[in-house]
Amino acid sequence: MGKRVGMEVSIAVAEAIGLCNVDVVAAYPITPQTHIVEHLSEMVADGHLDAEFIPVESEHSAMSCCIGSSAAGARTYTSTSAQGYALLSEMCYIASGLRLPIVMNVVNRALSAPISIWNDHSDMMMSRDSGWIQTIAENGQEAVDLTIHAFRVAEDPRVYMPFQVNMDGFILSHMIEPIYMPDKSEVDAYLPSLKPGLRLDPQKPVTFGPVGMPDVYTEAKVAQDAAFRNSKAVILEAWKEFGDKFGRYYKPVETYKAEDAETIIVTMGSLSETAMSAVDHLRDAGQKVGLARIRLWRPFPTEEFFDVVKGAKNLVVLDRAMNFAGNTGPVCTEIKSILFDRGHSANVFNFMAGLGGRDVTVQNFEEMVQKAATSKAPAAYEIINVRE
């Protein structure tokens, strides 16, 4: 039986990766991801983790190593943030196109310029169409659980897709929280040994990723998209299995006091807990306000999300990444398309906040809800906490 410990979230994630019997870690350090890969290197050096740790010269090389490792049949892991993710992103498309079950934690950080080491979701949104399954953690426990879940889904023979687990930099990654760490035997029972359906083998040569001429490229992408869409059923199944084994159940869209809500706040990541406090205050004041937290970002849980918000009059959507010259941020764009396709007439208020690590307070969320209650929905997003 696992035990409850107080631990920095990044260290807990590294320990969870060790519990997953990872074979190869290839990584380059970048703030605020560094503590994860530092601790993994210590675990390998001290003999606590039987794996190869490859200290590469760049993030691009890290993903290149991961591609080779995974193609050879090894359970493979990496981690990155912001500009590091931008550098390795070229290879991310190859990993997904080759259907390689690599797992990567992205410790979310703002993209420069100007240089920022603090948190927002610009790196996460940069990668939304890379063909990687993506979930996002709200707290340290979820960061641990979703990482274990990622290996289970990515390596399922029905999936074989790379999997990205997002966690907010500093706000989450560097916090010390109480976390239930499972026993090794429990993880072994949940996560079977990797059995790749196709791998590079000198004794049985095959070709991975050859040139796709115009007469095959479209079909290859259609097949990739179909597999990506079908992965959702396995994601949900693996969450159900995780809950049955560990007692913590996850859904693609989590709710808080949203059942009878006239106004629903929509968030992703660690700011969801701040939004819960705002919901409590507004409920105490007699306002029917609730919260919808998106847990599964890609593939987007369209039907589950609509079921949650279809009774609301107002949606207050928080985006934490710019969509330059766009009318709405990336999360709100997704949501508006869902409502439009279903003829839903909710008023959608899009707010941009928390860029580059700027605080978003309970009062900020209350102000967003009040604007939604007293104003006509604007055509474009409004940025919160902009200094004059």
Image (tube, grey):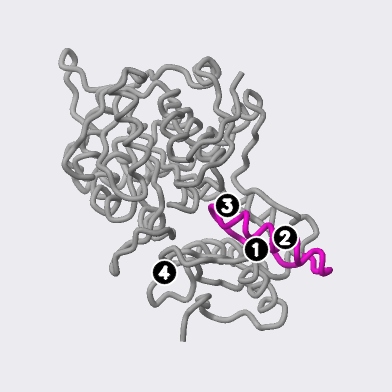
Query: Is there a contact, CB below 8 Å, between mark 1 and mark 3?
Result: no
* Residue designated by label 1: 265
- Magenta residues span 262-288
Where is residue 52 shown, x and y percent of the image? 26, 23
* Marks 3/2: CA–CA distance: 13 Å
Q: Residues within 10 Å of mark 4 (few under 14, many from 20)?
A: some
> SS for tag 2?
strand
Image disc number at residue 91? none
Q: Earlier in the sequence, mark 1 or mark 3?
A: 1
Q: Residues within 10 Å of mark 2 (few under 14, many from 20)?
A: many
Q: Amino acid at mark 3?
A: Ile
* Residue designated by label 4: 322
Q: Earlier in the sequence, mark 2 or mark 1?
A: 1
Query: Is there a contact, CB below 8 Å, between mark 2 and mark 1?
Result: yes
Where is residue 230 shown, x and y percent of the image? 49, 38
Q: Residues within 10 Å of mark 1 (few under 14, many from 20)?
A: many
* Marks 2/4: CA–CA distance: 25 Å
**265 inside magenta stretch:** yes
Q: Amino acid at mark 2?
A: Gly
Q: Residues within 10 Å of mark 3 (few under 14, many from 20)?
A: many
* Residue designated by label 2: 290
Residue 314: image quadrant is bottom right
* Residue designated by label 3: 294
